[in-house]
Image (cartoon, rainbow, N blue to C red):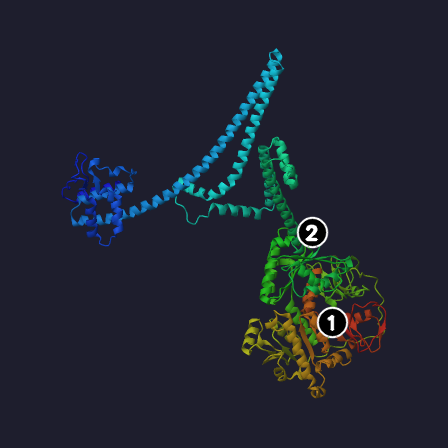
Amino acid sequence: MQNSNNDEASVTKTTEKPPLPKRSKTISDDTHFPGPLFPAVRRTDKPFDLRVSIDSDAAASSSSLSSSSLSSSNGFNERDWMYPSFLGPHMGRRRIKVKPNKLEFKGNEEKKRIQELGSKKEEKEVASLAATQSNSVTQTSSVSQLSGRTRGLKSSLMTYYMLIINCILCVCYAIYLRDRVEKLEEENSSLRRFCSYKSIAGNNGIDVLHTDNNSDSNFGNADGRTVALYSVIVTLLMPFVLYKYLDYLPQIKNFSKRTKKNKEEVPLKKRVAYSVDVCFSVYPYAKLLALLFATIFLIIFGGLALYAVSDSSFAEALWLSWTFVADSGNHADRVGTGPRIVSVSISSGGMLIFAMMLGLVSDAISEKVDSLRKGKSEVIEKNHILILGWSDKLGSLLKQLAVANKSIGGGVIVVLAERDKEEMEMDIAKLEFDFMGTSVICRSGSPLILADLKKVSVSKARAIIVLASDENADQSDARALRVVLSLTGVKEGLRGHVVVEMSDLDNEPLVKLVGGELIETVVAHDVIGRLMIQCALQPGLAQIWEDILGFENAEFYIKRWPQLDDLRFEEVLISFPDAIPCGIKVAAEGGKIILNPDDNYVLKEGDEVLVIAEDDDTYAPGPLPEVVCKRSFLKIPDPPKYPEKILFCGWRRDIDDMIMVLEAFLAPGSELWMLNEVPEKEREKKLTDGGLDISGLMNIKLVHREGNAVIRRHLESLPLETFDSILILADESLEDSIVHSDSRSLATLLLIRDIQSKRLPYRDTKPTSLRLSGFSHSSWIREMQQASDKSIIISEILDSRTRNLVSVSRISDYVLSNELVSMALAMVAEDKQINRVLEELFAEEGNEMCIKPAEFYLFDQEEISFFDIMIRGRQRREIVIGYRLANTERAIINPSQKSEPRKWSLDDVFVVISSGD
């Protein structure tokens, strides 16, 4: 209104014309047209005709609907145009009394202003005002619809509120009547006492009083039962009423606060259902509490219903209600329609509650059984070995750990992997291996989740082994890194050390940086690559490494022996009748392990001795034996190295490291041929990216051949009969699939053997390899060389099941990758210090495992003890750890009866740890 007044004032100021005279809208009340000559009269005032003409001049595009709405807003319709004269003045506006609206009042004010404006300029302004008025009328219609809905909502809510108020009033009135009855009973009892005391009333009077008392009591009981019945009915109806009108409560709240309804607001029913769902999901005992509440509710309101329809007391009714709930057959003796209906209803509710209880109990038992079956229960163990992950190496790893625990009567091994517990147990059962008292516990979970790690008692394990996954090397190492991060996040800390199997040597420093001193890494690819090269250069070394790394025979142990203090290492070397000392752990240098130390090194307090023994409890130092060398023995120098020719079939991701190892072992002038499907330009780029300086290779020359090792035509193009060693590598493109990789290696192996067999004439004319000229007396090496057509073939086999297939094809030597890696993991898990020893033995520098001929240590048919041979080996700065006789198939590491003399042949060979100088 204030805005319209301001507009009107501004229009008045701008116009200088005097206001137009105001015309009458209707006929005055004093005017009367009598008689039938004037039965009706037309209205004289036509304000809306002026309005329509203005609208047509100002806005020709306005619709007829807007003009009709304007006319209806002024209160005119067809009945207002004709009015009977004999009824007196015009009373059309008084028939329906409508409360004036602010928007209509504003429209009337605007119409007055239109009548006062005469110029064309004012007519344009009136047209805009007419458009504004039409919008206001539309708003008025929407408000009227909202008000209609609100009125309907109010009426339904008023009904609900009236019902609640009536219930409250009924209950209050029942309480009042009950109190009134109690007061009347007290007055009745006082009157009875008074009458008996005064002897005014006789027996009849007392009987009358008694009759009245019973009638009042019956009246009070009947009234109380009625209230109880109404209370039960109202209580049962309230949930249905609430469920129907629950969604209207937020609308009432918004209407009371004069706020608009949010279109995206979730209905209250859905929110309540969601809250109940969350409650049942979050709180495990919510279902049980809900069932208990439902049972109590049924007993109480069933008792009220029984109290309302029967003659029993309320306490008796509650007891009957409980019996009906507990046993549905107890309602059979009820008499009467009301008690029977109520008892049947209570019994039906009891059966429903009993069914729900059975369902909850069954679900709880099933969930517990499923958790036990799926491996979700907690492991309560300590000093156990924890294995995180699952791979094909797990079988051989479990075997090695079981053999290692045999001396202590067995142990506990816990496996945590992202597999089903039943599947893991079935796969372990397929191994058909006697675990010799060791228990294997499987749990399903992720090593990346702290809750799953706590479930397997990770903080109490004495050793943790992280297996590499079956993915490619980078993904496997990334997962291992995340597992190490999870282990470092355990709040309770770790009691034991962590052994991590890595796939790529380049990722090893990052894992050690994250894990710190607790982490010991075993790089599977690097270990296998170095072993393959050592076995290619020295045939038969694979069997010796299997014996040393496995727990079935002799292995490395470190222990402190105080009785050996102040003794020289030369004396310590022959102090153990059942073990062979190999090194010293120097306490003064922070626990550094020195392999093959000097003979004059004196053991100090705190030093420990590294030995090769059958088990940690099978050896102890004894008195020094009498070592007598019957004949002096001259030191024979090692034969010089000669150039060799080696072939690599396949491409490994760490082939650059293998080339660097070959560069350190081979003599100048050697050749390395590489046959694979990688283009030559990409090979040089990959080798350079791996850190290999191709131009800096001094001892070997790289010869590249592009081809597929399983295609016979590509293999026949190579001079296979001229190679000293052939290494069949597990190709990088198939490292994700063990079966395909082994199939490819086996096919390549058979093709090479077949091609070599057809070139036998050349083999007969081929001169003896120069590299074995110093081993002319070793029949074992000669046999192995002849078995492979004068080429030592080393095949990288990933699956141990392929071992039998390889043995059928008369291969001289082979490497079981997964078994050797599992052995190394088990040994480092038992004692993390052994990892330093293995790293030095696998490295291209420092001490190494070698096979030496007998002519280096004895004469033919000489009779001396093994201790004497050990002493002679010290002249060459070597530690003799075993031998292989000419007429046997396997080498013996850490032989027994070392002090007994025996005859030796020059065809025998000895296994030694050499300094490599």
Q: Which residue is mark 2?
A: 380
Quadrant (top left, top right, bottom left, bottom right) of the C terminus = bottom right
Crowding around mark 2 (Cα neighbors within 10 Å: few <14, some 14 to 19, many 20+) is few
- Which residue type does callout 2 highlight? Ile
Which residue does the image show at 44% across and 48% down from the upper left? Answer: 265
* Front in this rendered view, residue 879 or 85: 85
Residue 743 position in % (x across, y down): 65, 74
Q: Quadrant of residue 716?
A: bottom right
Q: What's the CA distance linking mark 2 and mark 1?
A: 39 Å
Q: Return the mark for residue 543.
A: 1
Secondary element type, mark 2:
loop
Q: Residue furthest left?
A: 17
Element carrying mark 1:
helix
Q: Report the front residue among 368 and 891.
A: 368
Q: Position of residue 522 (x, y in %)?
A: 65, 64
The answer to whether residue 851 shows anywhere in this view is yes
The mark tally for this picture is 2
